[in-house]
Image: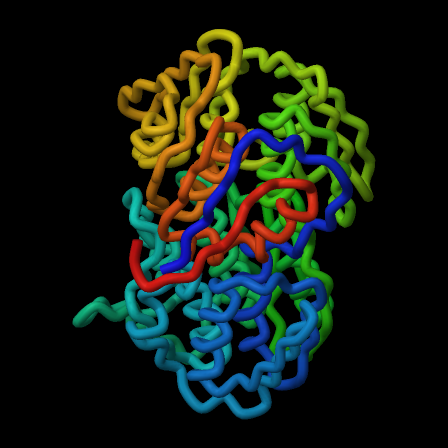
Amino acid sequence: MDKFVIHGGNKLQGEVTISGAKNASLALMPATLLAHGKYALYNTPELNDVYTMMKLLNHLGVVPEFKNNLLKLNTENITSQDAPYEHVKKMRASVYVLGPLLARYGIAKVSLPGGCSWGPRPINLHLEGLKKMGAEIELSEGYIIAKSPRLTGAKISFDISSVGATGNILMASVLAKGETRIVNAAIEPEITNLAQFLLKMGARIEGIGTPDLFIEGVDTLNSADIETIPDRIEAGTILIAAALTKGKVKLININSNLLLSILNKLENSGCNLLYNNEFIELDGTNNNIKPINITTSVFPGFPTDMQAQWTAYMALADGMSTITDSIYLDRFKHVPELQRLGANITVNENCAFVKGVGKLMGAKVMSTDLRASASLVLAGLAAEGITEVLRVYHLDRGYQRIEEKLQYLGADIERVKGKEF
């Protein structure tokens, strides 16, 4: 397994382009199962999760072609409605094929999903929603077996706002008979991107961007093309990297409206920012990091996928801060590894209490999941000495060659290939 070797202390400076959003791509790709035809998904990031979804879709009969961030998918010869464990186990987002397969073919057999190593992330909201639309759901030998000659519209109210469940039910409802209403729908930008794609395919959807979606089912859809939105989490991660190293960076291909909550917190912490719907500039040159509390919440609040990175940032703040994750209660596996670098952090249930220290010192640390890995890289960039971040395959799931972007900005970071460290 590869590792990163980081010589900390370099200020990040320069301009870098933000890649397409992982979480948007993983919803757009299975949406192509809804209609026969050829698709072009522009600005698709080159990530392990994208390749995993490509392999799953290829197993179903989709023919992919991927080059220079343009993903072409041909769905003219779907041969299977069975998503096996060998593909689904690698990524929770694989369950996104459930709604489209069931809606178009009347049957879907999908393995219960795998993915990140932390937290209970049940799919009961997906299944209950499909049941309300008339699907017969059976759980057998680790598989979800769903059947329905044709789904029918229904009112589906989510107890909690769920991006995954909203996406799955939205894709299922566009071919259902009659009207579907999704109450307390997720309003994350990735869901809006998906809804816009479905509109291009001929779906009838109202309320896009709001928690109240109305879908009038149609008999058939057509193929279409779509531009994947920029990755707000990659953008936020690089901004924090610059803030930690007292650097000055400009991000392009990013709309600041996608991450206003993060920008607000960075400004409060002492950074100077300039931004619009095309770029973000951060100047942390004179940043004496102020301790800023955050509580994660659904969009447009502070994203849970930025919680670990913010924890690393606050490790060098001038004072005490509290990090509360209201989305996932046990997403703090990065804390023991940050402590190895010298961070002063204690955790109580879903809260981390961070007392800023004067400096971090390089050490060997191990990645446990995607965003935890990012926090260790950020801490390593600011630490004195050498930091080795092991098991960076987690990072490859969600960041397109992040080390190359950091190198371009002046970081001393190197990928070292190997079987085991």
Residue appearing at x 44%, y 23% in the figure: 360
Q: How is the image coloured?
A: rainbow
Q: Is residue 72 left or right of residue 296?
A: right
Rendered image quadrant of residue 420: bottom left
Q: Is residue 33 left or right of residue 14?
A: left
Q: Where residue 212 sits: x, y (%)?
A: 59, 44
Which one is in front, 405 or 112?
Answer: 405
Rendered image quadrant of residue 60: bottom left
Q: Is residue 122 above or below residue 356?
A: below
Q: Where residue 176 sits: x, y (%)?
A: 52, 70
Q: Where residue 3 sits: x, y (%)?
A: 41, 52
Q: Is residue 203 above or below residue 272?
A: below
Locate the N terminus and report the quarter of the image it occupies. bottom left
Q: Is residue 154 left or right of residue 405?
A: left
Residue placed furthest toward the left:
141
Residue appearing at x 62%, y 32% in the figure: 10
Q: Is residue 102 above or below residue 226?
A: below
Which one is in front, 166 or 62?
Answer: 62
Q: Where residue 322 sits: x, y (%)?
A: 43, 16
Residue appearing at x 52%, y 50% in the figure: 414
Which one is in front, 171 or 27?
Answer: 27
Residue 334 visible here: yes
Residue appearing at x 47%, y 57% in the figure: 397
